[in-house]
Image (spheres, rainbow, N blue to C red):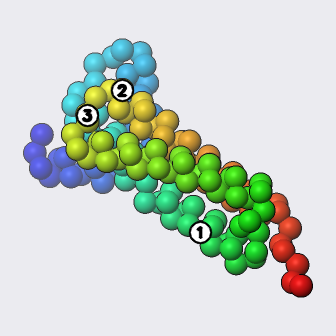
């Protein structure tokens, strides 16, 4: 595969492509190295967006004075744990971990981090704002 072809596939790999690769892995179809690498790249490239989502939720929670609310704090903590797991995966992937199990683990990490970010956002929105004294 040429450099340009590799670059194009990285730019155009979508979650649907990753899910298709996962389906191949789960059904034990042949998966070529470039597919694995494209999936790993997609997984690793999602970390910054998810981290930004968490930072946004924390900012909102702090702005309206609910960051210390136990439900909100727990949701933010869970989201940060999920993001840490995603970042650990991205670091391992960037250091050369490249196999089908890494794709599965990485996709799970992305989905867990996205779900945790969504839960934190929902908790922040549902919690009444702190009243001024």
- Residue farthest to the left, as pictured: 2
Q: 61 left or right of 83? A: right
CA distance separating discs 3 and 2: 8 Å
Q: Residue 115 versus residue 38: which sits nearer the camera?
A: 115
Rounded to the nearest angstrom, the CA distance separating label 1 from label 2 is 31 Å
Dots 3 and 2: beta carbons under 8 Å? no
Location of residue 108 in the rendering, given as x and y in whole percent from the top left corner = 49, 36
| Structural crowding at the residue carrying mark 1, measured as other residues with C-alpha within 10 Å and reported as few (<14), some (14–19) or many (≥20) | some
* Image coords of residue 120 (percent x, y): 68, 56
Looking at the image, which residue is at 48% across and 40% down? 109
Between discs 3 and 1, the one toward the N terminus: 1
Tell me if residue 16 can be seen: no
Give the percent coordinates (x, y) of residue 50: 51, 56
Marking on residue 98 = 3
Q: Hey, which quadrant is residue 80 in on the image?
A: bottom right
CA distance for labels 3 and 1: 32 Å
| x, y percent for residue 56 | 59, 68
The quadrant of the rendering that contains the C terminus is: bottom right
At label 2, counting other C-alpha atoms closer than 10 Å, the crowd grade (few under 14, some 14-19, many 20 or more) is few
Point out the image quarter for the N terminus: top left
Element type at mark 1: helix
Point 14% across, 52% down: residue: 4
Q: Residue at x 43, y 54 (%)?
A: 47
> Observer-nearest residue: 36 or 81?
81
Per the image, label 2 sits on a secondary structure element best described as helix
Mark 3 element type? loop
- Residue 128 position (above or below residue 75): below
Q: Which mark is residue 104?
A: none
Residue behind mark 2: 101
Judge whether residue 111 can be spotted in this image. Answer: yes
């Amino acid at each position: 595969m040429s450099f340009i072809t590799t670059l194009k596939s990285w730019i155009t790999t979508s979650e649907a492509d990753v899910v298709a690769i996962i389906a191949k892995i789960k059904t034990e179809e042949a998966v070529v190295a470039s597919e694995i690498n494209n999936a790993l790249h997609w997984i690793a490239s999602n970390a910054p967006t998810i981290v930004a989502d968490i930072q946004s939720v924390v900012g909102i929670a702090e702005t309206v004075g609910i960051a210390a609310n136990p439900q909100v704090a727990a949701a933010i903590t869970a989201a940060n744990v999920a993001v840490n797991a995603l970042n650990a995966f991205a670091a391992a992937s960037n250091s050369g971990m490249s196999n089908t199990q890494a794709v599965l683990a990485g996709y799970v990490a992305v989905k867990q981090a996205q779900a945790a970010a969504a839960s934190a956002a929902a908790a922040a929105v549902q919690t009444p704002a702190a009243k001024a004294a």
